[in-house]
Amino acid sequence: MPAHTGIVDTFSHSGIHYINTSSDVITETGQKQFNDRRIFIFIANTNGTPATFQMSKHHTIKPCVPKDVFPIVLAVYNGDSPSPDRPAVGLRSGELYLGPSDIWIVQSGVWANWKPSVSLMLDIDNDELYISPCATGGIQFVVDQATHEDNLPLTRLALGLQDSDDMTAVIAERIRAASAINTGSIPQDAAVTRTTHANTKSDIVMDVRVRKATLKGSKKDANATAAQRSRVNEATTSKEYVSKRVDKGKRKQEPERDLDATAANLQGDRLRASGPRDAKRRRTTPIMESLLTEISCPPDTPVVEWPNLGVNTYAPWFCDLDLEAVKTISLAPRAQDQTHGPGRPMVVELLYEAGNTWALVGLTSKIEEALSKGCAVLVRGWEPNPPLDFSVEAIQMYRPTMSQTVMVQNAVKRGKESSKGSKGNTAAIHESLTLDNFITLAADPNKCMNLLDLPNIQPDIPIFVRPLSDNVNARSATMNVAHLSKTGINSGKSYFGVQTMLGDAERVRGWDLMTHGGFLTHAHHDACGLCTFTSVRSGSKIWVYLGTPGDSGVGRESLFKAWDALFLDALKMTLPDVPLGALVLRKGDTLIQPPGANHVVYTPQNGLTSGGHFLCYSTMHLTQLVQWYDCGKIPGQAEGQRDTISTNADHPSIKRYLTWMVLGLPVLAQQATRTFYRRSTLALIALVEREEHYITIGTTEMTPAMHKNDTMNQEIAGERKAAMRIVNKLKGGLKITDAAMELEKGDWWDPGPVCAIKGLLREFVP
């Protein structure tokens, strides 16, 4: 459709001019459909000529709304004028004008200048909602002022802004991106698709709102400011408001008012297309998304409702303990709405924008900042290739070795062993079968299995994770440096780089998970203090994070006691004071979690996810914390390390990766884009300097014995010798006597202040 500066497809009724971008809306559906279409209403000017908008600069946005409110589609206008150059008469409440430096919103028939940090109540189709900033979609609507206030610090963190920063410019850009504003022509098909199908799934990420967890309707804000309450009371007690109050079925419905009379009486004030105020559009019950497909289970399997996630799933049907656990976690609030403490949301939600280099740099920076404080990150909009269905035909192109034997967990067997309590045999829950057989058995309602940690030596690493994978980056930075002696029997050799390594060094970087619908993974954190990323290829996952009482502002001893209580009761999950936060992962979602993120995973549908582990300089303080915990003794037991109850794997290659990170530190520290933190650097020093204090029994069992003259042993010795020279330089320059002792001070999750090590380590650059 070419750009228009005048009226297109006009329709007049009672002196009012209706304008639409698609004429068939009016001619085929008539006036009754006006509220369901994108209609613009203008009072005629004194000369009889309708007011006009430049339609080429108009687009729409579908902001996130509370669960019990129907979808809302709003017009967004973009212009060079500092303020709107025409009155808001006839425009819908909530519609926006984006100027060069300000955001304007239609409120009660007039333009209001909106600052995202300020609460603003709007009446949209008889729903009283508060507009609030959104890090991905620009704006969202929440139920009360308190929710808006709770949302502000989370949004600022996601945007990388400080408390004193003005969000206006950033939010305006997010609105432009979400509404796809441009100054060229808007294709007619695109306009109709975006505006007439308001109930279809949006291209923009919608599930990013912040709201209070509830099983029923949200409560009104009890903590609104006195000024806000006064303004609301004044508005709701006015004659005009009372005369327009919504009929809730207790009085006879008022007849439709004549538009001519309405226009004359208002004399340029707010005008509604439908005459009288329609009944509220609120749903009587939340609309729940069904995740009851792509799963095979007995016909009498109960359905579990996850009210705060808006989904229904089948419950585990093979073990009463798993069933009760799922019932408990199904009531968890959204993880995006929960916090570990001030400035530390449980999950930060971000959006991946393909092809935007600067946005990608900013995205990676925000991920690193969140992880460094122990916060998980949900990135929407990135998918690994290729997309796959959960079938042998689809997966065999991605993993051609269908005949390979794999070891799987059998939920039915696990249920039987779990019922025996301490007498249960954990080894009995596993069985071996071929990969294609595992996939085929997903159709058997009598089977429910989990294929954990299927190595992928050709992993598809998300572009925003690569800069954070410092175990790989450090090795790449020094890949030509050899630490294996070239004397003796190696005299005259010309090799370079690392010559020997454990097979686990490849396994840890990439893997696939395949799971039958109905499987519950019990509470744990990932091994060895590793960061983890997980991307969904098919099916869905419900990820539930388990906070611990007092996990902020407490010492390690108190934290470890809380973790002990959590893992010792991990199966029943009945602890009443464990903070929970849940989220649904689907195709296009990537979850990145920091070391020590305790979690439970429920798989409602047969699915394949891909992921990997990595180490990051900015999270070393969390890596050291987790390794120290996992190597400790289980309370009340003479033998047995905590890693047997807290995690489900061991990775013996991590010790060497940490050494490589020290060796690569001088090179990477020369990059201007790099930031290093004191407590994180202390943790890396402690992990390498006293590595014998961070070895679990499982790591020892998985490491082959080596003679002191073995090539690998000699190479490792050469690497450690070079690494210790760097460690000693760091300790002297940062005035560190005992790194492990200094880590006992301060908040355990705090990476510490920025420390300058570029000049300190320049002499070690190859």
Image: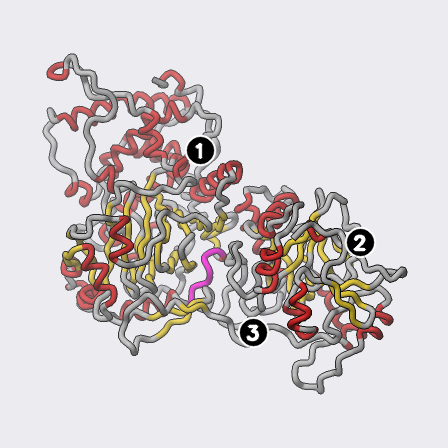
Q: Is residue 92 in view from this perspective?
A: no
Q: Which x, y percent locates residue 660?
A: 29, 29
Task: Compare residues 432 and 657 and report the one nearer the observer.
Answer: 432
Mark sitting earlier along the chain (3/2)? 2
Which residue was labeled with disc 1? Answer: 677
Q: How many other residues sit within 10 Å of disc 3, few (<14), some (14-19) or many (≥20)?
A: few
Q: How many other residues sit within 10 Å of disc 1, few (<14), some (14-19) or many (≥20)?
A: many
Which residue was labeled with disc 3? Answer: 283
Q: In the rendered view, does 236 fall on the left or right side of 532?
A: right
Q: Which x, y percent locates residue 730?
A: 37, 24
Which residue was labeled with disc 2? Answer: 86
Q: Is residue 612 in view from this perspective?
A: yes
Q: Which image quadrant for residue 623?
A: top left
- Report the magenta residues as a range: 331-336
Locate the C terminus by quadrant.
top left
Mark sitting earlier along the chain (1/3)? 3
Q: Give the residue type at disc 1.
A: Tyr
